[in-house]
Amino acid sequence: MKKIILNLLLISTLNFAAKAQLVIDSVSILNTCLDCDSINVIPLPSSYGSLYIGVSGGASPYTYSLTGAHSANTTPLITSSTNGITNSYNSLCQDTYTLIVTDNNGDSLIYNFSTIPPPSPTLTIDSVSVKPDSTNNPDAGFIELHVTTNADSVFYLIEDEFNNLNLGSLGGWQASPIFDSLPGGFNYKVFVDIYPKIVPNCGTGISSSTNLLLIYVPVLCANDGYAFFDTESFGCAGDTMLFTDFSNPGGGFNNFIIDYFWNYGDGSSSSNFGSTEHIYTTAGTYFVSLQISTVEGCVYFHEELITINPIPTPGFTQTDDGAGLYSFTNTSSSLTDSAATYIWDFGDGNTSTAINPNHQYAAPGTYYVCLTASSFNCEDIQCDSITYQNTVGVNKLNNQQHWGLHPNPVEDYLTITNITSTISKIEIIDITGKTIKSISSNAHKIDVIDLHKGFYFIRIATDDVEMTKKFVKQ
């Protein structure tokens, strides 16, 4: 009895060892461009998707059951084979499939696969760094690239723009290549592409295009380059300041200035090439700067301090002290300015530099008094008329009503009012004392349409008196 039990155990052990596990030996999958929603499309793609699979182990024959995720493939396709090889699944569309292989003993395995072509490889150029360096060649620089890709590798090729430098084939496969010791002052063409380039992408066959970059490598900026301009240190509010450019781009092959940036220090700027000009409307101190850029990528900077001074506003009043003596009171805006100077012109050939002068006129008449106020070479002038009259003229004038001008300011015609004497002559005079218009008649309405805008004097002469008034032409 013991012997029989041992034999049964031995037979059972041998049978267990003979039962091999069901395994997949080989798989071949062909992807397809045929969409499962377009199975009946005409014409069909050149090839369907297919599956070739070989299994071993377990107990043949084998049964294969194939289903897909798409609604057109959810019904299982079942085949059987005695040798473990099936060629049944050769008309597949794009889908994700599940294959269940079952042997004669009921053992099974599951294999998942897809007939959808893989996505096209992508390439992104993340950054490009370009710098001059300080190798043995002072005009040398380098280019460094960083890329991101899902392809197997990336290929690079570099040459100068016109392929005149005999660089040869400077290529590379690394993700972040550096091309060093490149002669500065040139444009370089850098070709970047994934590898392999041809992939089974439906309809195109080529999944990428070569990226071509045109990159400029500057030289190490030479010490002989500079930005510089010349201008007056002082100016007046409202004046046009001239800035004369004397910048130098420095050495280098075919080097020149490609960009100017002027900052006038008052909130305004310009990109005027070379010399420029600017009007400062407000007095103050301003830092004027110039920045230039060269074709070699060099940048230079220069700054000057200028002072814009205010223009004095001259003004005065006069008092008739009798017998041709007048006293003048200076009311100019620059009275508190210790640097201000004043020049009086009394209209009779005499002048004065006093702040508040007195002046004696030798003969009766109308005189044009002008005051010029100056400070740091900024000046302005104000003129007014005075009439020194003899006693007879004064009595005659006092016997008349006070005469006037209407309208004042005037645009077209000026009317003289309240003069009873016969007018023998009318003159219109500008603030410099120049006679603009003269009328020898007893006119009371004067045409001033052709006058420019500004201040004027009108002088009226009768038989025994002259009278002057100021008016404004609009």
Image (tube, rainbow, N blue to C red):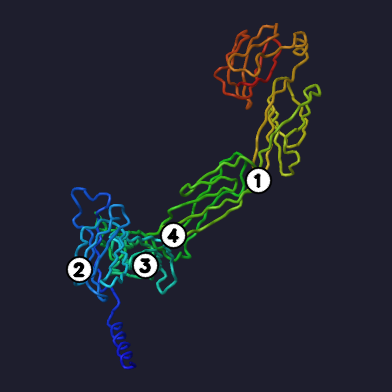
Q: Which mark is residue 284?
A: 1
Where residue 42 appears, as percent x and y from the top left, is: 19, 48
User: Dot 1: what SS?
Assistant: strand
Q: Where is the C terminus found, in terms of image quarters? A: top right
Q: Which mark is residue 81?
A: 2
Amino acid type of the residue that numbered disc 3 sits on in the rendered structure:
Pro
Where residue 104 appears, as percent x and y from the top left, is: 25, 71
Residue that badge 4 annotates: 297
Q: Whole-Å distance between the Cαs marked 2 and 1?
A: 101 Å
Residue that badge 3 annotates: 183
Closer-to-camera residue (215/301): 215
Where residue 43 appears, as percent x and y from the top left, is: 18, 49
Q: Whole-Å distance between the Cαs marked 2 and 3?
A: 70 Å
Where residue 426 appears, as percent x and y from the top left, is: 63, 14
Q: Whole-Å distance between the Cαs marked 1 and 3?
A: 48 Å
36 to 11, vertically: above or below: above
